[in-house]
Amino acid sequence: MRHRIWSCLLVLLLPLIISAAPFAGFAITHTPAAGSQATISQAAGGAGVKNVAEGVCFGFSASTALGGISTVTINLRDGATGAGTILQSWQYTLPAATVAPFAQCFSGLHISGTANTAMTLEGSAAVGNLMEYVTLVGYTNP
């Protein structure tokens, strides 16, 4: 009987225990001008705090033809733009032509970074005439 009472009490208190835990979510995006690199970083959370990517979205288009065939790489990094370990990467090859708007989103990633380290989602280095955007969604976890 005691076991049932404690089990019921735990079930009733679980939502309160979970809601008391610190939670800091983020959703950040960058949409620069054509020909500029899209990059966004979630700052380091402090000692013992990790950034966790739950979802990413990115996209690109070109209403004016690209100067040549271009490979666009989207990197999720454990660190600052252009530095740090690549946690996940997506790559697309684009024609030397106009590019119809393209967008891709991934959710449920659960990709954890290193404690006290920024997390960055970045597009390729500037590609002339290419418009790109990146969005990073996640939370910090002590």
Image (cartoon, rainbow, N blue to C red):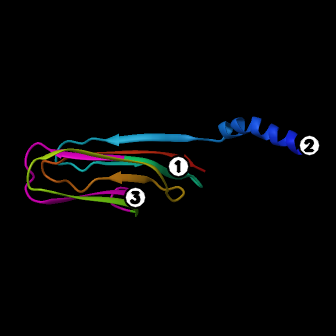
Residue 108 is a magenta residue: no
Q: Earlier in the sequence, mark 3 or mark 2?
A: 2
How busy is the neighbourhood of tag 2: few (under 14 within 10 Å), some, or many (20 plus)?
Answer: few
Q: Position of residue 107 (x, y in %)?
A: 43, 47
Where residue 25 appears, as percent x and y from the top left, is 51, 40
- Contact? badges 1 and 2 (CB < 8 Å): no
Q: Is residue 62 magenta?
A: yes
**Callout 1 environment at 10 Å: few (<14), some (14 to 19), or many (20+)?**
some
Which of discs 3 and 1 lies nearer the camera? The answer is 3
Tell us which disc is closer to us: 3 or 2.
2
Identify the mark at residue 77; answer none if there is no mark: 3
Q: Within 10 angstroms of label 3, few (less than 14), some, or many (20 or more) residues?
A: many
Q: Amino acid at mark 1?
A: Gly
| Mark 3 and mark 1 residues within 8 Å of each other at the beta carbon | no
Is any part of residue 132 visible from this angle?
Answer: no
Q: CA distance from mark 3 to mark 1?
A: 15 Å
Residue under label 1, please give it.
45
Instruction: Tell me which segment is drawn in magenta.
Output: 57-83
| Residue where numbered disc 2 is placed | 2
Question: Dot 2 lies on which element?
Answer: helix
Q: Is residue 116 left or right of residue 87?
A: right
Apparent side of residue 21 relative to residue 137 in the rendered image (left or right): right
| Quadrant in which the N terminus appears | top right
| Type of amino acid under label 2 | Arg
Q: Are marks 3 and 2 in contact (CB under 8 Å)?
A: no
The residue under the point 15% across, 59% down is 70
Q: Mark 3 or 1 closer to N-term?
A: 1
